Image (cartoon, rainbow, N blue to C red):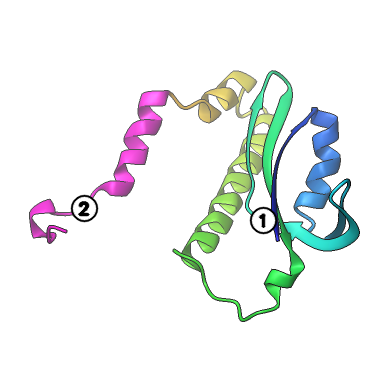
Amino acid sequence: MKVRARVKFSSEEFKNFEKMLYGGDSFLVVREGINDEPREMRFGKTIWSENDEVIKFQIYLIDRSHDTGEKSLGLFEPEMTNIQAMLIRTTESLINLLNILEKKALLTSEERQSVKDIEREHLLSRISMFSEVDNLDELPLK
């Protein structure tokens, strides 16, 4: 069984939810008014947005019974998971470096912010690099 829901959180509520979301543990879910028997579930893939101090999540709850079979790698795995881990480490390293430089007064807070602020056109040009190939004429038509 899968359940999809959309929820809204304040920043403080999200801090509590985040511990459960990224904790990796399963938990009991009761579908009140549908079935009073608790089911062991876990979080599936989530998507979210933040606007005006409100954090909105679309969550999927997956019944643990789906996890008993042989596990197979999903599309673009394990590469995607490894890329995400590398990106997180790189981002955290950059934040730590900016903190150290600012603390040592080698970087002003305005300079720090300019490192973090990326203009939309620069971002789009960098994103387009993901679809660049050496020579398009050498690729077969599909």
* Residue at screen point 80% across, 57% down: 23
Give the residue furthest to the left. 137
Q: Say which quadrant the C terminus sits in.
A: bottom left
Residue hosting label 1:
44
Residue 63 occupies which quadrant of the picture?
A: bottom right
132 part of magenta stretch: yes
Indicate the position of residue 127 as horizontal and vertical percent values.
36, 40
Report, in whole angstroms, how far the alpha carbon at label 2 lies from the one at label 1: 34 Å
Please tell me whether mark 2 or mark 1 is closer to you in this view: 1
Count up the numbered dots: 2
Residue hosting label 2:
133
Q: Say which quadrant the N terminus sits in.
A: bottom right
Apparent side of residue 141 relative to residue 58 in the rendered image (left or right): left
- Residue 12's place in the image compared with 91, above or below, is above
Indicate the position of residue 57 as horizontal and vertical percent values.
68, 38
* Residue at screen point 66% across, 28% down: 50
- Residue 9 is labelled as none
* Residue at screen point 36% across, 32% down: 124
Q: Is residue 26 visible?
A: no
The local crowd at label 2, few if under 14, some if 14 to 19, many if 20 or more residues have their Cα within 10 Å, is: few
38 part of magenta stretch: no
Task: Return the residue nearer the eye: 30 or 45.
Answer: 30
Q: Main secondary structure of the magenta part?
A: helix
Give SS at disc 1.
loop
Give SS at disc 2.
loop
User: In the rendered structure, which amino acid carries the disc numbered 2?
Assistant: Val
Please provide the residue range marked out in magenta: 120-142
Task: Return the residue nearer the eye: 6 or 127.
Answer: 6
Indicate the position of residue 103 as horizontal and vertical percent values.
71, 32
